[in-house]
């Protein structure tokens, strides 16, 4: 059994501040109240507050100017995709927007992989597809499926596609357990993905894109139903 994480007062304060920022209680561009006022309001010490500020600054939600104060960053204008896991934890509404990007990027990756994949990469794709069908449970199937998509991204020869794929999967992490519907049957999961791998392996770019679009549409529907 895995030990449950123990929340510290800094963890709790970080979560409270994050939710207050994302809910608009502290709007983008506004300065937070003075540290002493804020610490008293949350019932914590200023040291605890500074630790929480440090985490939220690293996360891209705050910025501190010496002698001026701590301001809420406009994360929608200045933030990056690394914020997505945090935003998904805050609101599942982000999942729909992530899936929209997943669909367009995934289809393009399949098309590019069909055009550029090497013989070794085609063999790897088929091997990883076999792992999906042989996986022991839904969790293992889901993880094996992710590795197929990472291999597809590598087969494009474009490292940016690899990083985008990683970013999208990282965004799922907070709700991954609720997205297992397409992966409960290993053989069905393999058969669903097989047309994509076959089209990529044959070098048929149009078929690869069409197969990927179908796969992404079907799995998105199943995952959204599970999330609901």
Image: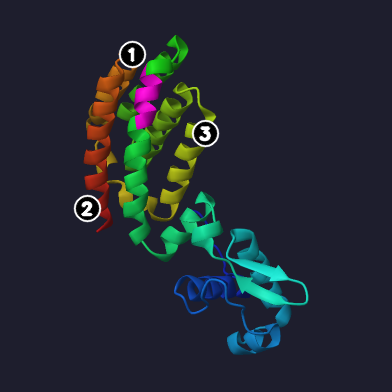
Viewer-side residue, 92 vs 160: 160
Q: Callout 3 environment at 10 Å: few (<14), some (14 to 19), or many (20+)?
A: few
Give the structural element (helix, strand or loop) at label 1. loop
- Count the marks: how many? 3
> Disc 2 and disc 3: Cα gap in Å?
30 Å
Left or right: where does residue 153 sit relative to residue 14?
left
| Earlier sequence position, callout 1 versus callout 2 | 1
Residue 47 coordinates in the image, percent (x, y): 73, 77
Which residue does the image show at 36% across and 44% down from the upper left? 101
Residue 27 coordinates in the image, percent (x, y): 51, 75
Tell us which disc is closer to us: 2 or 3: 3
Which residue does the image show at 28% across and 30% down from the upper left? 212
Q: Which mark is residue 160?
A: 3
Give the structural element (helix, strand or loop) at label 3. helix
Stretch in magenta: 108-114
Q: Callout 1 environment at 10 Å: few (<14), some (14 to 19), or many (20+)?
A: some
Which residue does the image show at 33% across and 61% down from the upper left? 93
Residue position for label 2: 225
Which residue does the image show at 70% across and 73% down from the upper left? 50
Residue position for label 1: 203
> Disc 1 and disc 2: Cα gap in Å?
33 Å
Q: Callout 2 environment at 10 Å: few (<14), some (14 to 19), or many (20+)?
A: few
Q: Which quadrant holds the C terminus?
A: bottom left
Q: Which mark is residue 112?
A: none
């Amino acid at each position: 059994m895995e030990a449950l994480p123990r929340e510290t007062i800094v963890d709790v304060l970080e979560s409270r501040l994050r939710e207050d920022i994302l809910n608009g209680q502290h709007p983008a561009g506004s300065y937070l109240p003075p540290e002493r006022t804020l610490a008293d309001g949350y019932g914590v010490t200023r040291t605890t507050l500074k630790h929480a500020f440090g985490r939220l600054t690293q996360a891209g939600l705050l910025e501190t100017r010496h002698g001026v104060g701590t301001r809420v960053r406009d994360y929608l204008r200045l933030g990056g995709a690394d914020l997505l896991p945090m935003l998904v934890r805050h609101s599942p509404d982000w999942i729909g927007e992530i899936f929209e990007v997943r669909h367009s990027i995934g289809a393009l990756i399949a098309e590019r992989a069909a055009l550029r994949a090497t013989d070794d990469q085609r063999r790897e794709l088929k091997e990883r597809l076999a792992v999906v069908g042989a996986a022991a449970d839904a969790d293992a199937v889901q993880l094996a499926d992710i590795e197929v998509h990472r291999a597809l991204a590598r087969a494009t020869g474009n490292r940016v596609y690899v990083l985008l794929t990683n970013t999208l999967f990282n965004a799922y992490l907070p709700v991954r357990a609720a997205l297992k519907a397409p992966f409960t049957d290993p053989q069905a999961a393999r058969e669903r993905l097989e047309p994509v791998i076959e089209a990529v392996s044959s070098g048929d770019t149009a078929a690869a894109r069409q197969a990927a679009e179908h796969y992404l549409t079907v799995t998105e529907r199943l995952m959204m139903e599970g999330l609901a």
